[in-house]
Amino acid sequence: MNLIITKAYISCDAGWFMDVFNVIDYDGNKIRDKEVIDYIQRRLESNASFSPSLRESVGVMPSEEHTSIELSGTDRPGLLSEVCAVLTDLHCSVVNAEIWTHNARAAAVVHVTDDSTGCAIKDPKRLSTIKELLCNVLRGDDDLKTANMTLSPPGVTNRQRRLHQIMFADRDYERVEVDRLGGIENKKSRPHVTVLDCSQKDYTVITMRSKDRPKLLFDIICTLTDMQYVVFHGMVDTGRMEAYQEFYIRHVDGLPISSEAERERVVQCLEAAIERRACEGLELELCTEDRVGLLSDITRIFRENSLCIKRAEISTKVGQVKDTFYVTDVTGNPVDPKIIDALRRQIGHSVLKVKHNSSISPKQPQETTMGFLFGNLFKARNFQSFKLVRSYS
């Protein structure tokens, strides 16, 4: 529902849980519409006793209207343009897609249809050809890891959930040399993650401080779940630019983290979860009428103007496209405004708009100490029922 969580308190004990979320809408306003509030309550209460599997813990999106393709490989300038060109040549129309890049790796979930019928592509021979050609593009000349293209299985989770799983499986959390990434790494803007022991309660305590952004909590919980950790207690607090999160966790087997190697792996994976969706570069929004080959043409123009797409969201509804691109130059640095002016003249000022440059660094992270929540966190709790409490104050 694009709600923003500004504060949260999470607690569970003896099979009962009590979670409190302070939320606002995407524009920063308090939610006062009674229909919206009732809808939230119905959805949460209807799912209160639902216990999904690990891979289906966020949402299920089956569809017969399109073919869902998952891609992963080594990132490089112009990669999305090459992928879109191949799909256009194969008479595939991209209706929705989401593309992430992180740590020299790229991943995408792309929904395509046949450009003549508008229906899902199911012919095995044609799908095999699509897979072969896309893997050739993804592999490149110096791919140190295996490029991959698969069809999403029935009942797959939503795109953003799958992107976390794809990049986690691709081990994008392993740091690579800065010169391979291009640009200069800004350590001040990186998230600050600590993993500490809480031996008296058999928990592991994770604290995170980073630049705040929408869906930050979602990204972290997805990663902890994929790593098979359970959050028992926690809190989230956000300021104007920064978010602080603290969680008391155990592995699904009931044990806290016991080895230094696993502790380091958790730090790396949570840093990656925070960074994957971080708004890097200049945000460009494309709004226009859809046509065959549009995305291929737009990404080709970006490539010809030496723009590197760091992240993209592609959406088509009722014949209209609304695409968002986050771009830098090929070295990872800010784009020259003259290039953007030339792009807008070529594509159309009313079609391509500059949203904002979101590369502002947050305050420098500060060292945190365990115990932020200890005041009343472990007092005995007896939760007899689940109830969503609505506050109008």
Image (spheres, helix red, strand yellow):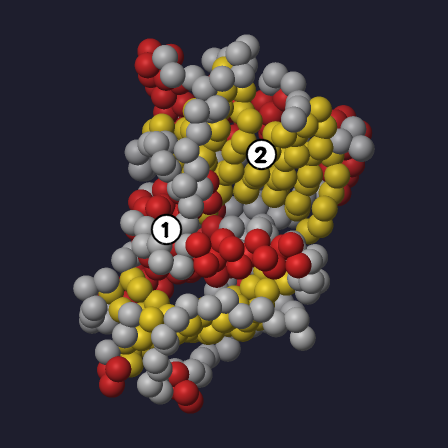
Looking at the picture, tell me which residue is in the foreground, 23 or 73: 23
Looking at the picture, tell me which residue is in the foreground, 375 or 308: 375
Sequence-wise, which precedes: disc 1 or disc 2? 1
* Secondary structure category for the residue under label 2: strand
Q: Answer with left or right where residue 390 lies relative to residue 167.
A: right
Q: Residue at x 29, y 70 (%)?
A: 15
User: Which residue is under mark 1?
Assistant: 57
User: Which residue is under mark 2?
Assistant: 314
Q: Answer with left or right where residue 29 lies relative to residue 248.
A: right
Q: Amino acid at mark 1?
A: Ser
Q: Residue 81 at x, y = what percent? A: 55, 27
Q: CA distance from mark 1 to mark 2?
A: 24 Å
Vertical placement of 29 versus 297: above or below? below
Any part of residue 265 in sight: yes
Any part of residue 209 in sight: no
> Among all residues in the image, which is located at the extreme bottom?
375
